[in-house]
Image: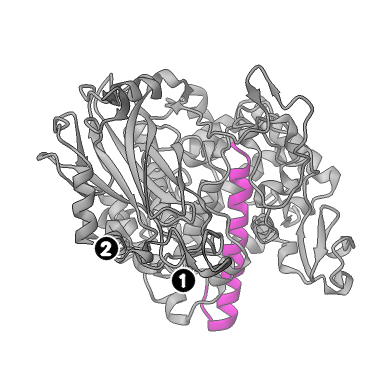
Amino acid sequence: MMAFSTMLLAIVFVLIVPSETVHPIDYPDEMKACLHTVSSAVPLEKECGAQTVTACLDEYLFSNSYETWHPEPTPEYESFAEEFCQVKPPPEGEKIRIRKEYRSLSNDERNRFHDALNKLWQDGTYEHIVAFHANSSAIPVAHSGPGFAAWHRIYLMRLEDELRKYDPDLTFPFWDCRLEADLYEENLGPHWSKIWNPWFAGYGGDMVTTGPFKDWKIRRHFGDGGLPNKERIALLFNATYEEAAVLPYWSSPWGLLELIHNSIHMWIGGDMVFISLAPKDPMFFLLHCFIDYLWEEMRVYYNDKYGIDPAENFPDISNLPSRSQAYHNKTVRMPGFEPLTLLDGYSSNWTRDVFTYEKSPMDRNCSECSNNNRRRHCDHICGKNLKCQNARCVAKLLVPDFFKDFPVNFHPETTRVRRETQVDGDCQSGVCVNAEPSLQNDFMCNGVDDTNHFKWVPVKVLYRRPKNQKYNTYAVHESRIDTAIDLFDPVLYQPLEKKMNTSDPGTYDQCQFQSVQSYAVIRSDSLSAVSTPQIESCPFSGKYAFDSEYAYLAVVSPEHGPVNVSFIAYDQCGRLCTPYCRQKDGNFARCTGLFHMDGSYQGFGANPSEVIDKQLDYKNGLPYLNDKNIFLIFDCDASTEYYFNRFL
């Protein structure tokens, strides 16, 4: 490592960015605790590092966004909250509510569900329910601990009560996203599920513009984070007695359930990333209904297997931070639902007297009508909106041209051809509709979408070719191709291989091979405002031993006061790139990737072009980019190291 570190420092830096304008900072305590817990519980060979870091960052942003910014409560909301907080028993003679998977609803049930939600939205009730989730006293109790499942169970039930005021027979459906995660196995991805069509949840380019919620101004940005597949959900039901009943929360299947929930939030993206905005999207409640479904399945399973009484099995909170332990004590009253305590939320009476769940189609076997026939329907098991394939109910797919009406950058990636690529008049006035799309960020800051609230900064990214990769560029000897030797492999020149000091790359389900068209994803997040992540993709030629590139990231403007910003980078497999921050002496050292920035930093630009202009110099009549304003370098070496461990 020493050889490459020396090379890294030699690449840069004669001029020094004044330390008071931008300087590295430590992780917040809550983020440290999350990184320590999750990295200890989730080995890197099982989960790519990017998932861990982004999960903890997003959890921190989610938990602290209310303090950062939130809409102020109105007198109308205060009046609503007084009534909403009253958890009453169901009316005498009311049948137990049976909740179904979203696609198991009949057409009539689904239409009535959508109509009732829209009526709540139109009369202002839904907006108040969104604000209730962001109540400052509820946030620490309802997240990051055993209060999570209990509080959200009551919250969801109260929304269901409100819906039933318009339609007394309605129950809230759940979204079993394992059905969408299965589409990864078909080389498609969750975007291709029929659940996003106008008759279900709708779709849009950033803003949802189709479906029953098209007028709600809901923001989604699919793809950051991950949807849990059936194998990951199966881990919830694979715990020992000690893990299920003795070990602390984050080491138990109950803590894993919350982590899985977090990753689904992040995959949907958009509003779902922020605690003040997340319930704006009805998929929030369909997701939480699924989490409640899994929680109930787990409670029954571990009761049957180990005799663990779910009403008394309140997880150990000893590995939570001391402040969180006070919030997640089982005797603590549920904020917003007093006098109920957290332990009351664990009672089995809710699923005995108020609601229960119909088995998800994902948990059914349709072998009797499958026979490996992809086209055969199995309506009596899977329903009309799913199909049976290889003895399992699976998602139906969108029609091939579904995405044609949306911007190209919102067409999902796929290795399967599902739409025609030949379009008449591909290029007009310099715009080519089938050109490789750039990433489109939405530039939301404190509820307003506007690029004027952002400034751009330069970040340098280094790429090292992983070991044991071949890219079909072979030597030729005596007119025969020698496939044992890749001409660009650093092993052909030992001094270079020694300098590069790379190791075998970590691989995951979504990345079993390297592409010659490699790239790194760089993400910036404001810790000082409620803003959407700003993301850029940095391309490299994967076959070269070494490559470098610049990325230009938007950050919330510090014009009205200093800001704290997080930067994360990872390669196309999700392997973390190690951040190196400029120190006061001008050299670079490993760091957290978090910075404190003020308006006097000279590298800011109102747009990327202004930043590049500040970098552009000439020597001997030739242009080159200088590094005088570079404060951060990412080293992408395909390793599976948790670089942040040394800072915890």
Q: Image quadrant of residue 382?
A: bottom right
| Label 1 sits on residue | 313
Residue 557, image x, y percentages? 33, 24
Q: Image quadrant of residue 576?
A: bottom left
Confirm or deny contact between disc 1 and disc 2 (CB under 8 A).
no
| Label 2 sits on residue | 495
Residue at (25, 50) in percent of width and height: 29
Residue 84, image x, y percentages? 55, 38
Quarter of the picture holding the N terminus: bottom left
Q: What span is in magenta?
A: 281-309
Q: Is residue 305 magenta?
A: yes
Disc 2 packing (10 Å; few <14; some 14–19; many ≥20): few
Observer able to see residue 482: yes
Between 281 and 453, the residue placed more toward the observer is 453
Residue at (73, 57) in percent of width and height: 96
Q: Main secondary structure of the magenta part?
A: helix
Residue at (77, 31) in percent of width and height: 423
109 above or below 602? below
Mark nearer the N terminus (1 vs 2): 1
